[in-house]
Amino acid sequence: MMRRSRPLLALGLSVLLLAGCSPSSPGGGVETETATWTLGTGQEVTCVRSTEAEPAEKPIDDRTLRLGAYGENFVTSTLSTVGYNNLIAISTIYDGLFAKDFETGEILCRIAESYEFIPDETGEGMTLHIVIREGVHFQSGDPITAEDCFASTVGRVETVGTVRTYLGDTIDVEHSWYEGERDLYIKMYQYDSTILECLSCQWLNVGNLSFEATATDDDLWDNVDGSGPYIVEEQISGDSVLLKVDDNYWGWGIVDERPNFDYLSVKFYSEASIMTIDYERGKIDACIGLSFNDTKRMMSQGAAHSSTRIVSSGNYTVICLPTYVEAFQDARVREAIFCAIDTDAAAKAAYGALGIPMNSYVSSMAPYRREYHTNKYDPERAKALLAEAGYPPGALSFYTVVSANDTCSVALAEIIQSFLDDVGVELTIDTFDFPAALQMQRNGEVDLCITTFYTMNSDISGCFIQLPEGSYNKAAWLTQLDPELDAKLKEGRYTQSTQTAEAAYAWIQDWLDEQMWYIPMVEYNTSFVCRDYVDDSGFYNLMHTRDIRNLDLIER
């Protein structure tokens, strides 16, 4: 993916420009300009940029880009355990067959040189033939082969649960193969409109098969052999990672341009406010994951020598009403919970500038997305429906858990608790660390589930990771397992006809609106700020990728 450096106002997109002056600190005002545009993925970007004539002087070492990241804690370099806590490192150390250009929505080749879909003679299946670029290699100098790519894609369908959830019904592992050094053949049970986007995710980045076969835990910590543009120099567990630009990276001038720095330092923060303080003191050059208070302040007032932007992430929080709770099997109770909560007010109060009230059942990234009147707030109707269903005030009591370190989720839970109390429904809230809270939801130990749907791909079916098979069928965040819904999801995903997909996905969204098994609450914005000597022109801080390779220092 080639980096494109361009001034904000020269974007070849639909841009709304506003100009003004507003105070950003007790020391005086900051002239700013604001632009809003929509990416090819459907996501909206808003950027507030200060307009000083000359950029600030970079403090400390001008050959190191220093980044702060909230909500991440790099723990391993192994691709078998990719998760939200190590996405930044994984996306810099490793590369994939493909990558998504979030500006245009296109899937671009990286390690892959080309690809083609070959229909089977029977007409039932299909084979994705991928040709590996000639001359690509790992950081050790070992060539990246078709065997490495096979193990990192087809092999992970068998070994990594997240990959199996998305591609288990698509990839025929047994009948996939590779030939020679450059030809990979992925056998598919049927055409899948999402497969290239799935292959562009970090879960399927390419690792060195021979290295991983013998690597110790220490090797994966200090001596990882990556396929990407950065080499691990130093790691401090739970604190930071120092990455060095690999001058021998195969992709310079092919899929990327070498950045104008030599080192990338990433410091992890458990408190977003502390990260912002370090930014304002000049200790770091950029921040990913601002708090909603800091986001509101910087977006409304500006910040000297800074560019602040928010981007819709495609991830969204919902209230799931599990089928194993007897009360929720009554459609009147489900509608009553809907009517009890002012979803727009709750989203605004809990998330501020980081929240987008939802008027749909799927994310802004999903094609064929339809809008609905999802805020059904009507407490009097909620009370009437509960009474009709045989539940007078005080008769219903629910239990939920949320992650203790997610302040927005905790605030949202307390707001929901208050709304439910107004209609005579009790909600008890417990907070745990994220792994414990997730496991309790997975085990079906909650009555009402406040959770986030993470969109791995932009297809609507990617919004339904809550529909896997196996042990997850008792999970609290599981949408009703309806055979017709399942059939329509597959019909939309596995067709090559846009008309068929549009009709199937229209049916799905109408079904969700009618059945009310979950309440869409808020879609996340993610926030980012950097100094004006940082080139952020090609960077979109997306929560589910956190790929920072398009950040650079402005060349002087």
Image: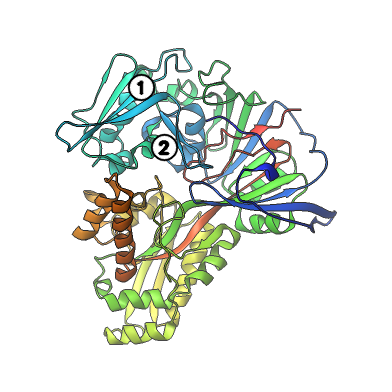
Residue 143 point in image, percent of width and height = 41, 14
Colouring mode (rainbow / by chain / secondary structure / one colour):
rainbow
Q: Residue placed at 32% from the left, 29% from the top?
A: 116
Q: CA distance from mark 2 to mark 1?
A: 18 Å
Q: Quadrant of the C terminus?
A: top right
Q: Residue placed at 67% from the left, 26% from the top?
A: 260
| Amino acid, disc 2 | Cys
Answer whether residue 322 is visible to the viewer in this image: yes
Say which quarter of the image contains residue 425: bottom left
| Amino acid, disc 1 | Val
Q: Nearer the viewer, residue 58 or 405?
A: 58
Give the structural element (helix, strand or loop) at label 2: loop
- Mark positioned earlier in the residue sequence (2 or 1): 1
The residue identified by callout 1 is 131
Up the image or down, 377 lies above or below 167; here it is below
Residue 398 point in image, percent of width and height = 35, 71
Up the image or down, 130 lies above or below 536; here it is above
Residue 506 point in image, percent of width and height = 33, 60
Up the image or down, 379 lies above or below 238; here it is below
Q: Residue placed at 33% from the left, 55% from the top?
A: 502
Residue 396 point in image, percent of width and height = 33, 78
Packing grade of label 1 (10 A; few <14, some 14-19, many >=20) is some
Q: Nearer the viewer, residue 220 or 263?
A: 263
Q: Nearer the viewer, residue 547 or 124?
A: 124
Rendered image: mark on residue 201: 2
Front tag of 2 and 1: 1
- Residue lying at the far left of the rendered structure: 122
In screen coordinates, is 468 left or right of 320?
left
Q: Residue placed at 29% from the left, 41% from the top?
A: 192
In screen coordinates, is 36 left or right of 177?
right
In screen coordinates, is 500 left or right of 455?
left
In screen coordinates, is 10 left or right of 319?
right
